[in-house]
Image: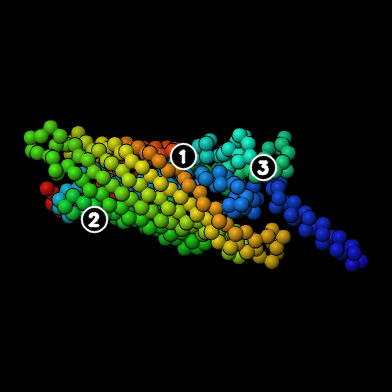
Amino acid sequence: MKTINKLITLFMMATAISAYAADINGWATTTETLNAFVKANNRAGYVKPIIDNIGNVLNSNWFSGSTIDKGFAFEAGMPFALVPIGDDDKVYKSPYSNNKIPSIFGRRCRADEACNNGTIYGNETLNGLPLFTYPYMQMGFSFYHARLVLRGMWLPAISELQGFNLWGAGLQYSFGHLYKKDKNAVKSLDISLLFGYNSSTVKYQPKEYKSPLVLDITALTADVIIGYKPIKEMEIMATFGYQYTNMDASGKMTVKDDYAFLGNIKPDQSVQGNSGFKFGIEMAFTLGNMFHPVVGFDYAGKSSFTTNLLYFKQQNGKE
């Protein structure tokens, strides 16, 4: 009887392990996804689309115009960028061949394929995302043609998301006052320089684990902003610059007793996102005394859309 019980126990464990090794629906299991954050598994490309999208979101919305007046001004709002999840986000080049295989945003294994072929397929939840965005609050203070920007966001633990925080700071300086004259042809043209830095931490803890995966995200940008005002209520801006983004995974993910067969995971992957040249076109509007929305398009390795619609500014005195 004892022998039969042992055989039944072994069979049940083997069945459970099989279910986790190859999801019956063809999607990557939680464990397979998490193991991509371990450097030794050589799957940085699988999770790279995460920092590609987050980096572009965080390096957006730093400015609301190229001109910064001499008088004191205060601004605040909730800007956000929209980054479409494209086909390039759903595949990456295998480190062992030139073949393109599914990323964390990629497809599942089809019914006509051998799903135990060693390929790790996409995550079911992330595969359905059409857009990527990241929420934060932002405020700014300007005086004597210089502008300080502060941003941040904090969320409590919600289900498997065990923590989220973001803080950032930016500095912008406008040069237009150095060359503008009352009768000068370039009176409506301004140039400014901006530096922005973001730091964010995300903690994710699936139900099978006692401790979370920790993702530390860094994003910074340096931009030249050229603005032109065809009318007082609108400014058209072109931006050129450089951005850097990076994601470091850490943590010691210990499994719960009921899932001991999965094994512990120690994430240590470091992945660089879209880093390099960037450009964009934005339009800022002054509607009434305070409403100051900004919309635009940016490109830094992939496209994103600036949607700074809920933004307000109070200007006290100008040049």
- Which of 193/295 is in front? 193
In the image, is 48 to the left or to the right of 21? left
Instruction: Decide: few, some or many residues near mark 1? Use Cα within 10 Å; few <14, some 14-19, many ≥20.
Output: some
Query: What is the three-letter code of the residue carrying label 1?
Result: Pro
Query: What is the three-letter code of the residue carrying label 2?
Result: Phe
Residue that mark 1 sits on: 84
Q: Is residue 58 above or below residue 163?
A: above
Mark seen at residue 24: none
Indicate the secondary structure of the residue bearing disc 3.
Answer: loop
Q: Residue 111 at x, y = what percent?
A: 71, 37
Mark seen at residue 141: 2
Q: In this figure, what is the number of numbered marks?
A: 3
Choose the circle earlier in sequence order: 2 or 1. 1
Residue depicted at 36% across the width and 55% down the height: 168
Q: Is residue 239 above or below residue 291?
A: above
Indicate the secondary structure of the residue bearing disc 2.
Answer: strand
Indicate the secondary structure of the residue bearing disc 1.
Answer: strand
How much space separates mark 3 and mark 1, taking CA atoms?
25 Å
Choose the circle earlier in sequence order: 3 or 2. 3
Q: Nearer the viewer, mark 3 or mark 1?
A: 3
How much space separates mark 3 and mark 2, taking CA atoms?
51 Å
Q: Quadrant of the N terminus?
A: bottom right
Mark seen at residue 119: 3
- Which of 81/146 is in front? 146
Choose the circle earlier in sequence order: 3 or 1. 1
Q: Residue 284 at x, y = what percent?
A: 27, 41
- Residue 150, located in which quarter of the rendered image? bottom left
Q: Residue 208 at x, y = what percent?
A: 64, 60
Residue depicted at 57% across the width and 39% down the height: 92
Q: Residue 110 at x, y = what percent?
A: 68, 37
Residue depicted at 50% across the width and 37% down the height: 86
Q: Could you tell me if residue 20 is visible in this image?
A: yes
